[in-house]
Amino acid sequence: MRTFLRSILARLKPSQPEVDRTGFDPHAYWLNRGKTYERDFSYDPRYTEQENALGAILGRLDFNSVLEVGCGFGRIGEVVERLKPGIDYTGLDISPDQLVGARRRLPNATLIASPLEDFQPDRRWDLVLAVEFLLHVPPDRIEDVVAKLKAMSAGHVVTLDWDTPVKGRIAPHNWRHDYQRWLGPRRVAVSTAGIYHWQLGDAL
Ligand SMILES: C[S@@+](CC[C@H](N)C(=O)[O-])C[C@H]1O[C@@H](n2cnc3c(N)ncnc32)[C@H](O)[C@@H]1O
């Protein structure tokens, strides 16, 4: 009986713990964090697992051009470059500091320093990729942001984000969204993250 009650109570609890986001400004946060992000980045096995899983998925897709949104210092750009050397790759990031690292890793890439929200491209890409990006988009912006990723794609959208419930507190710059709702059912699990693959023509 006690177990039954506990399971009912657990279901009533919000899946995302309350976080104090008073005064939190995502753009200001990333502009500042970008100054030291690469230096502070520690390469644990979770990232290798992500990169291998992503590489396996991307290896099955047909694409000749990529836009990576929130490309950071080029970690995922390198995965793409290894898979398709010399590919037409564009990396977008709000942080000019992050793009210094991306330029070092991806000397031939087109790199654009801009918030996604202000970016008005006059082209589309075969693949739009966003890794550990959507989890930093506040809930009131997620629908528009995902719609924009889709609008910029001529074929595929692939995302990777933490999407499993947590018990402890989460950081003010993280959110867990209902990716299934925005990107459909094609999900591959990688430890605590999910890779979602949306394809042009998918009906949601
Ligand atoms: C957690 S990092 C992930 C970086 C890279 N995708 C990776 O997996 O190594 C999130 C990146 O998104 C960028 N970012 C956050 N909000 C953004 C926005 N609104 N527009 C463009 N870039 C943004 C940050 O500057 C940061 O480089």
Image: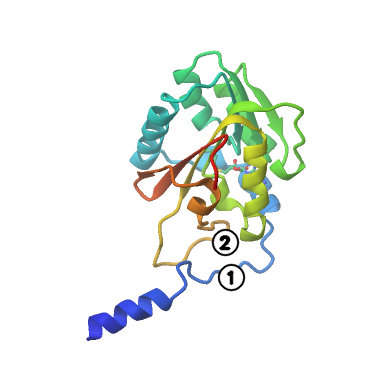
Q: Secondary structure at mark 2?
A: loop
Q: Is mark 2 within 8 Å of ligand 1?
A: no
Locate residue 147, reporting x and y percent.
65, 45
Colouring method of the image: rainbow
Residue in the picture at 49% in, 21% down: 62
Residue 112, picture quadrant: top right
Disc 2 marks a residue whose amino acid type is Pro
Q: Is mark 1 within 8 Å of ligand 1?
A: no
State which quarter of the image contains the N terminus.
bottom left
Q: Are marks 2 and 1 in contact (CB under 8 Å)?
A: yes
Residue in the picture at 41% in, 48% down: 193
Which residue ends up furthest to the bottom in the rendered image?
Answer: 1
From the image, tell me which residue sits under label 2.
172
Horizontal placement of 112 versus 20: left or right?
right
Q: Which circle marks residue 89 in the picture?
A: none
Horizontal placement of 196 versus 127: left or right?
left
Quadrant location of ligand 1? top right
From the image, tell me which residue sits under label 1.
20
Locate residue 57, reporting x and y percent.
41, 31
